[in-house]
Amino acid sequence: MRNIILIGMPGVGKSTIGVVLAKKLGFSFVDSDLLIQEREGRLLHTIIEEEGLDGFNCIENEVNASIERENSVIATGGSAVYGTEAMKHLKEIGLVIYLELPYKELVNRLGNLEERGVSMKKNQTLEDLMAERRPLYEKYADITIDCYEKQIREIVAEIADKIAKE
C-alpha cells in the first residue's frame, strides 16, 4: 500500500491520529513539521518570525515536496496546502485524507497560536484562516473525515475502513 497523507487545520489531531493509524496499519509515521524543524534547526514559530510567512511556506513546500516514503502515515502542517508542488507530490505518493472539525471545536483545542507555529497573516483570525484554507483542503482531499465529537479510535477505524474500500 502507498502512503496516507493527513491534512487539516492545526489542532484537528493530525499527528495524534497519525501515530495511532500508523500502528494500526503497520506503517511508519512521519510528521512533516518535525522534518521542517530538523532541516532548519529551528522551531516552527522561530522560522516564521525570522523568515516571514512567505519564507516559511516556501521551506514547507520544499520539505513536503521532497518526502520520499512508502507505507507511511504522513501528518502535514496545517499550511501544507499552500504548497502546490508539495501537494501535487503528496497526492502522487499517497492517499490524501482531510480531517475536518468545526471552528468552535478548534478554538477549544488550540492554545497559543504563535507558540504552535501556526502560519497566519497579521490580524488574521482563526476563523478567517479556516475560511481561506477549507477550499484547499477540499480540493486536495481524496477522503474527508468529520472528526467532530469522535474519539481517536473511532476516527482511526473510520479511516482504515475507507482506505480498505479505495
Image (cartoon, helix red, strand yellow):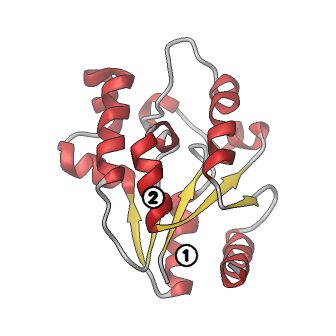
Question: Which image quadrant: the C terminus?
Answer: bottom right
Which quarter of the picture shows residue 6?
bottom right
Q: Which residue is mark 2?
A: 90
Which quarter of the picture shows residue 104?
top right
Q: Please report whichever mark, 1 or 2, sits nearer to the chain's N-terminal start.
A: 1
Q: What's the residue at 43%, 40% (across, down)? A: 83
Q: Which residue is mark 1?
A: 20
Q: Number of marks in the image?
A: 2
Q: Percent position (x, y) of residue 53?
A: 39, 24
The extreme right residue here reads: 149
Q: Amino acid at mark 2?
A: Leu
Label 1, label 2: how far apart the Cα atoms are:
20 Å
Q: Secondary structure at mark 1?
A: helix
Q: Percent position (x, y) of residue 39?
A: 20, 49
Residue 107 or residue 70, whichever sits in front: 70
Q: What's the residue at 69%, 47% (across, down)? A: 138
Q: Secondary structure at mark 2?
A: helix
Q: Percent position (x, y) of residue 42?
A: 22, 39
Left/right placement of residue 89 relative to residue 49 reads right
Q: Badge 1: few (under 14), some or many (20 or more) residues near its Cα, within 10 Å? A: some
Q: Percent position (x, y) of residue 31?
A: 40, 59
Q: Amino acid at mark 1?
A: Val
Q: What's the residue at 40%, 48% (across, down)? A: 86
Name above or below for residue 118 compared with residue 77: above
Which quarter of the picture shows residue 110?
top right
Q: Badge 2: few (under 14), some or many (20 or more) residues near its Cα, within 10 Å? A: many
Q: What's the residue at 60%, 43% (across, down)? A: 9
The extreme top residue here reads: 123
Left/right placement of residue 148 relative to residue 92 reads right
Nearer to us of marks 1 and 2 is 2
